[in-house]
Amino acid sequence: MTPANPTLSNEPQAPHAESDELLPEIFRQTVEHAPIAISITDLKANILYANRAFRTITGYGSEEVLGKNESILSNGTTPRLVYQALWGRLAQKKPWSGVLVNRRKDKTLYLAELTVAPVLNEAGETIYYLGMHRDTSELHELEQRVNNQRLMIEAVVNAAPAAMVVLDRQHRVMLSNPSFCRLARDLVEDGSSESLVALLRENLAAPFETLENQGSAFSGKEISFDLGGRSPRWLSCHGRAIHIENEQAHVFFAPTEERYLLLTINDISELRQKQQDSRLNALKALMAEEELLQGMRETFNAAIHRLQGPVNLISAAMRMLERRLGDKAGNDPVLSAMREASTAGMEALENLSGSIPVRMAESKMPVNLNQLIREVITLCTDQLLAQGIVVDWQPALRLPWVMGGESSLRSMIKHLVDNAIESMSQNQVSRRELFISTRVENHLVRMEITDSGPGIPPDLVLKVFEPFFSTKPPHRVGRGMGLPVVQEIVAKHAGMVHVDTDYREGCRIVVELPFSAST
């Protein structure tokens, strides 16, 4: 019977008895051709064997190192403590690993990453030392170069005046420089970087979303923050995506990328402040011209108002006299004189009406009410200081735009501030405080201007909005057109203005304006 063929298998076969141990020659060749420098020394570090890699790295031939001490490789720059640690470990029959500065035969230096281990006999006694080392000079140089570049980049980033922050996909702060931390302390209540990131994302919603979803960079996006009595902050923001390869081992052969977001914020407040100062100088001239024209309009309107009464009385008396005289009216000298007076009065009224300076039509545009208030306060600084008035301004940090005429809205605020200053300039007013605030309430932008003056009596809160009515003493300059002009401007912007009758410590004027739905 023919025996069956043996089953083929991929499993390693058990070695024959005579090959249970590898031959010494195999060990010798293995060590000789190992890619790491290997040496065997006696207990005094005299070299008994050195392999090919040892000779290649050090530049010494076999006959030049055999019998020589390992100290021939020493350059003398390795600290003595390192050698003390080495021999201390070997005395404990334990291996030692570390780095030495070695010297080749040609006097060049290299870094040797060395491991020395004791070779023990069956009695546990050290009989030889086994040394293994490799040249790590290039690796060290590369590591140092990377570390130096990192230190230089960190120094540049930390010293940069621009605020920088790196975010992960969950908007967590991975890295931020000192400028960003300072900006956070200035702009958000808790002073945290996370809160500032949330504030920036809120004000840069559209470009930030595009950056997150598509990786599209944005540049030069300007946002501003009003900080009460302090100067406003203007920021120019830039964003870009950073793609970094995943560092985990399981994706070594299939690398993946992680996306981080870099935000760079430049504080351009000083530049914008200079521009604002130049603009305010131009505004002063413009407001002075506007006030002059407004004064002329009020003067003409007052004259027309005063003249309209007598002219109407003459016209009424003339019609009564005509009815009384009947057919004889044509020859009556008194009636003839009244007709001449009425005609002259009507002509005078027409001439006065035609002489009123025309207010130029103003196109509507998005207006920042906080900015207008800041401009008016700046324009009125001299008056406020002269009267010893303390201004407490509390603007909303984020106020929607109001669609309207910028000049007319600024003029409206100026009228209200001028009225408040005039009210508090009376001698009997000792506490002189002007409080201005803005906020969003009931889908409206609400502005409150409160003064610590004598206030308006409850029975006059409606009459003060009538033309030519004034609560000022007779000797005070005033035509009684400030609040009527304010009411006219607010009405043209579909808003409301009223006196807060619940406020008893002075006068509080409340203006409410609708804001643009696109903000």
Image (tube, helix red, strand yellow):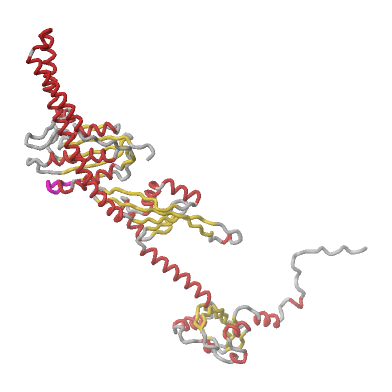
Q: Is residue 499 left or right of residue 513?
A: left
Look at 9% across and 18% down and name the residue there: 337
Q: Is residue 263 visible?
A: yes
Q: Is residue 257 left or right of residue 510?
A: right
Residue 56 figure quarter: bottom right
Q: Nearer the viewer, residue 137 or 315?
A: 315
Rendered position, 6 above or below 438: below
Q: Range of the magenta residues?
A: 384-391
Q: Residue furthest right?
A: 1
| x and y, in percent, of residue 312 in the image | 14, 20
Q: Residue furthest front?
A: 331
**Which quadrant, please, contains the N terminus?**
bottom right
Q: Is residue 94 visible?
A: no
Residue 437 figure quarter: top left
**Which quadrant, please, contains the C terminus?**
top left
| x and y, in percent, of residue 517 in the image | 37, 37
